Image (cartoon, rainbow, N blue to C red):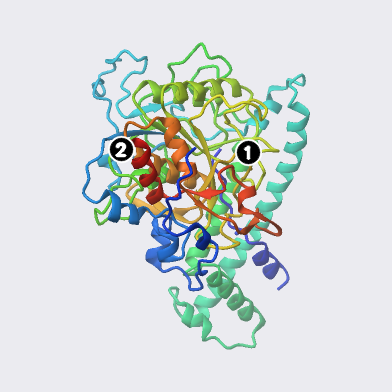
Amino acid sequence: MKTVKTYLLSAFAATLFFGCGSTAPIISTPIEDIDTSPLKIAELTEVEKKNWGHLDLVKDTIPGMSVDKAYSEIIKKRRGKSVIVAIIDSGIDIDHEDLDSNIWTNTKEIANNGKDDDKNGYVDDVHGWNFLGKGYNEQLEFVRILASGDTSNPDYSKAKAEYDTEYQKWLGRKTQYDQIYQQIVTADEALAKHIGKKDYTKEDVNAIKTEDEALGQAVQVAKYMYSNGMESMTDAKKEISNGLESINDRLNYNLNKDFKGRVNGDNPDDMASKFYGDGNVKPVKKTESHGTHVAGIIAAERNNGKGANGVANNVKIMSLRAVPNGDEYDKDIALAIRYAVDNGASIINGSFGKSYSPHSDWVRDAIAYAGKNNVLFVHAAGNDSNDVDKKPNYPDDNLNGGQEVSNAYIRVGALAPKYGSAMVAGFSNYGKNNVDVFAPGASIYSTTPENEYDTKGGTSMAAPAVAGVAALIRSYYPKLTAAQVKQVLMDSGLPINTKVVVGGNSDNVKPFADLTKSGKMVNAFNALIMASRISK
């Protein structure tokens, strides 16, 4: 499941109620100097905020992937091979101004003729496939387990205990957000009345001197929102309103035992029926933006004067709509992986995950199928601040932490744009054995539906960053296998030997090397150099 975004800051709540393979030494700075690099004191500029994942640690003092450096010093004007990257996610706005020229087209299929021209079982699959049909909202997997009423399920008792805790937690959050939203509205009205205009500025608020208690509290609320990145009280209302929408979705759909989200007519527990859904890979509503955001991180058109630059050029995005507003079905994911492999993808990005997986074997078999067919599967580590060596996050490529079924599956944790002890995003999962690398994932600017752009955070954003680097490698060094590409990504990264805060908890500090198998953050510049040497 994609992360449910909530915007409540505990300090804000308190404030208001009492008154967020080969190890060649090829790196952009000597290894011994990495952890003595100066920390960046100044706030990121607006340009840096929108592009930080592409910047260079040494030049910019920001833990990016040296993407811009790779283009200016290695790629330059070289021509690479076109690479198909399948994105298994929510719908993708394939008509977006910054994506439309980089969308995969199935040339063997005639659009909208109602026929399966290429005989692959999918009718009119011109740009991919939509396994959800017109569906959008869904339950969480543990809620489905409860709703089944099957008490013999080994996860039933665990699911029931989790449900009771989660439901109360989200009811509490709804109450809290409703109160915060009302206080922001009240403060906004008081400030607008006192200042004499609705579009007042920070400077107007800062200039207020008053002994009036109610107006003083309104000023306090506004200043707090400004200090947390809000440009105006209108932005603050929008932010809290978005949080409320996520909370209401969680209560009304994700945690609703009576909700039925499946609309395809197939049985998600029976793999016999495979050809359901339709060829419309676009979002069903504007707020279904996750897949479009992921696509932009990988392949937004570079240097076209529009909102964002993708990591990779020479990419064609295959859209596989299989991730709803809730937990994905194992069947949809397994079939989407196999579709991607069978229709020419060389990289698959999976920015989704869940804690329960009743048919994990179906997905694991599909991951093994991808590996055997030389397709790299890039998967987000998850956003629960958990050690996935101890608490599984699905899908994975091993059975109960044992032998891996594929050497072409790579799991990615998320970095924040602040080099030093705070560089691991507080939400990111981690694991010495089961998280392979880290990459930029917090506060990432990218495409959203209807020619818009937004900043989102999650390991969902870190995975496509790595998929983009993998696409560069496969484009310019096409002879390398998927397994070799994975090894290059792991071995060529920058090793971080410092200690970092884990899970956003300042009392939990560990060596970065304890959070990931490679002990490194992905670096595009180094990866291309290493790929060149291995290729030769």
Q: Nearer the viewer, residue 102 or 251?
A: 102
Residue 118 image offset from top left, x and y in percent: 28, 15
Eyeballing the image, is 142 above or below 198?
Answer: above
What type is the residue that disc 1 sits on?
Asn
Residue 433 numbered tag: 1
Residue at 59% x, 53% y is 6
Figure check: 119 above or below 535: above
Q: Is 400 placed left or right of 184 in the picture?
A: right
**Secondary structure of the residue carrying numbered label 2:** helix
Q: In the image, which disc is placed on residue 475?
A: 2
The secondary element bearing badge 1 is classed as loop
Which residue is outermost to the top?
272
228 left or right, relative to 530: right
Within 10 Å of disc 1 (Cα), the crowding (few <14, some 14-19, many 20+) is: some
- Placement of the C terminus among the 4 image quadrants: top left
Q: Position of residue 403 (x, y in %)?
A: 62, 26
Q: Amino acid at mark 2?
A: Ser
- Please state the total of marks drawn on the protein image: 2
For the point 23% across and 21% down, the residue is: 110
User: Compared to 303, does 396 lie above or below?
Assistant: above
Using the image as rendered, state which of residue 521 and residue 354 is in the foreground.
521
Q: Picture quarter containing residue 343?
A: top left
Q: Disc 1 and disc 2: Cα gap in Å?
A: 29 Å
Q: Nearer the viewer, residue 22 or 238?
A: 22
Give x and y (percent) for residue 125. Answer: 33, 23
Q: Quadrant of residue 501?
A: bottom right
